[in-house]
Amino acid sequence: MATAKKATAKKAAPAKKAAAKKAPAKKAAPAKKAAPAKKAAVKKAPAKKRTPSAAFMKPLTPSAALAAVIGDKPLPRTEVTKKVWEYIKKNGLQDKLKRTMINADAKLKAVVGVSPISMFGMTKEISKHLK
């Protein structure tokens, strides 16, 4: 019985394929031009430039240890972070395998305290050196 069912199933499959081939293909309707609709679209006003928070832009004086890394001029927090990263990149202190870890040298270790430190922990330690 099982062989009889398989034989009928095999015969039925080609019949379905043949029926599918006989169906006429639908022709695509001619494309309509949508160019006039694009011209009618209302232009959006340019986005306003975001102003930074006053707390981030307030110049802060670095401690003596941090001044050895970034300089002794008062800088906003954003600039302090940029200067520290410039120092890290220049001296190759970023870990090669785990890029979120910083291998501090003598100058940076005076600021952050421990040698392998994550970049997020580093910013926390640097904020302690700003007044």
Image: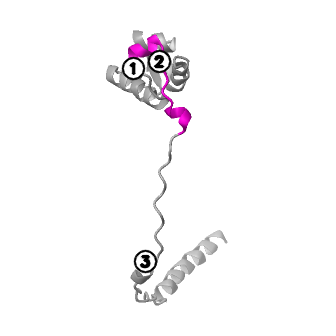
Residue 101 inside the magenta-drawn segment: no
Q: Are marks 1 and 3 in contact (CB under 8 Å)?
A: no
The quadrant of the rendering that contains the N terminus is bottom right
Please name the amino acid that badge 3 sits on. Lys
Please name the amino acid that badge 2 sits on. Pro
Q: Are marks 3 and 2 in contact (CB under 8 Å)?
A: no
Q: Are marks 2 and 1 in contact (CB under 8 Å)?
A: yes
Stretch of the chain drawn in magenta: 53-71
Residue depth check, mark 1 versus mark 3: number of the one nearer the observer: 1
Instruction: Give the residue pinned by disc 1.
Output: 70
Q: Nearer the viewer, residue 24 or 70?
A: 70
Instruction: Give the residue pinned by disc 2.
Output: 62
Residue 63 at what x, y percent from top left? 48, 14
Residue 4 at what x, y percent from top left? 62, 74
Local secondary structure at mark 3: helix
Instruction: Give the residue pinned by disc 3.
Output: 38
Residue 56 inside the magenta-drawn segment: yes
The tally of labels here is 3
The correct choice, above or below, for 42 with respect to 122 in the image is: below
Position of 9 with respect to 74 (left or right) is right
Q: Is residue 105 visible?
A: no
Residue density around tag 3, few if under 14, some if 14–19, many if 20 or more, within 10 Å: few
Question: Which callout, 2 or 1, points at the residue further toward the start of the chain?
Answer: 2
